[in-house]
Amino acid sequence: MEAKQRELLFKLAVCNGIGNLGMLKVLDFSMKYNNSTDFSKEEIIQIAGITTYQKLFSESWDHWLNNPEKLQEYYNAHSFITILDPTYPEYLKQIYNCPVLLFYKGNIKLLKKKCISFIGARAASVYGINVVRQLIPEMVRHDLTIVSGLAKGIDSVSHQVTMQQGGNTIGVIGTGLDRCYPKETAHIQRKMMDEQLVISEYPNGTGPRKYHFPMRNRIIAGMSLGTCVIEARKKSGTLITAQAALEYGREVFAVPGNLFDAHSDGCHGLIQEGAKCTICPQDILEEIQLFTI
């Protein structure tokens, strides 16, 4: 990929008023016209279909245009791949609105591994934590990379157990890589940046926003062969990830729990809707082995 295209995509990513879909449109247009990158802000507004936030984008674009040294310094502070890079996960390319850029810290080679995501309640019970400890070691032994969202509860336990077992794990976050949210998992995030991999579609300085996390969830589901849900209430962000996995045609595994515990209501609902009732590692492995990359 030409340096000019990378620079254009980065500039778009750090501009306000344009979303990922708009960036995909600009990239598509660029590729149709000999990888052209010399666009005016008016052309980008038209190509990307920016309507409501035209003024916001225009001001942001002009800010970076008038501060090229600052933009270059910001560019140099990031490690990132684009959707055109060979390292970009093949399964992630298949989803609607796949991220144009993935910022990363850690071992980028993990993106080429077969992945399975483990997600669940932030307020994980002892039961949920024990389920993670029961399932993940076998995933590691079969060279599956564990993906999760570095949230409290099931997410962070999944990352920790994977590392304890000597396996590979990828964290997908909804902030810039220079932020740790929530603070309770900051030590895990820093360790993973050194020894594993943490990715985000948001540049440094981006704080947590409510809408970032459903967007983050599509990446978790999209890059995974399947998604295993351990403890989820009927209305939770965890079910957004599970629903995304279903929409992408990926396998969804749901661990049953106590009938009288609301933490398991979401899992029981998924099982009723066709998710695979999962009570041992083999329930996952026999399905995942049907997939090839």
Image (cartoon, rainbow, N blue to C red):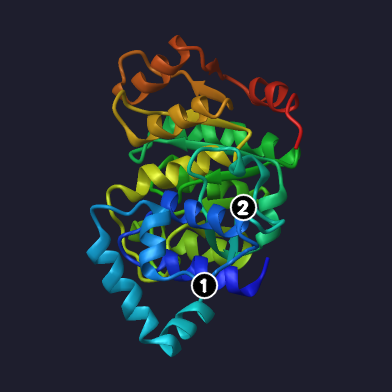
Using the image as rendered, state which of residue 65 and residue 152 is in the foreground: 65
Residue depth check, mark 2 versus mark 1: number of the one nearer the observer = 1
| Quarter assignment of residue 47 | bottom left
User: Is the Cβ of the residue at disc 2 closer than 8 Å to that at disc 1?
Assistant: no
Check the picture and name the quadrant holding the C terminus: top right
Residue 176 shows in this picture:
no
Q: Residue at image x 75%, y 24%?
A: 290
Query: Dot 2: few (<14), some (14–19), or many (≥20) neighbours within 10 Å?
Result: some
Using the image as rendered, state which of residue 104 and residue 54 is in the foreground: 54
* SS assignment at label 1: loop
Q: Residue at image x 30%, y 47%?
A: 211
| Quarter assignment of residue 203 | bottom left
The three-letter code of the residue at mark 2 reads Met
Residue 113 shows in this picture:
yes
Position of residue 216 relative to residue 142, above or below, is: below
The three-letter code of the residue at mark 1 reads Asp
Q: Position of residue 94 (x, y in %)?
A: 60, 38
Q: Position of residue 227 (x, y in %)?
A: 54, 31
Using the image as rendered, state which of residue 97 and residue 277 is in the foreground: 97
* SS assignment at label 2: helix
Position of residue 248 relative to residue 112, above or below, is: above
Question: Is residue 212 left or right of 170 when viewed as pictured?
Answer: left
Check the picture and name the quadrant holding the N terminus: bottom right
Q: Mark 2 or mark 1, which has the lower sequence index?
A: 1
Using the image as rendered, state which of residue 272 and residue 46 is in the foreground: 46
Query: Badge 2 is on which residue?
Result: 163
Q: Residue at image x 38%, y 54%?
A: 19
Question: Is residue 12 left or right of 132 when viewed as pictured?
Answer: left
User: Tag on residue 38?
Assistant: 1
Q: Residue at image x 44%, y 27%?
A: 243
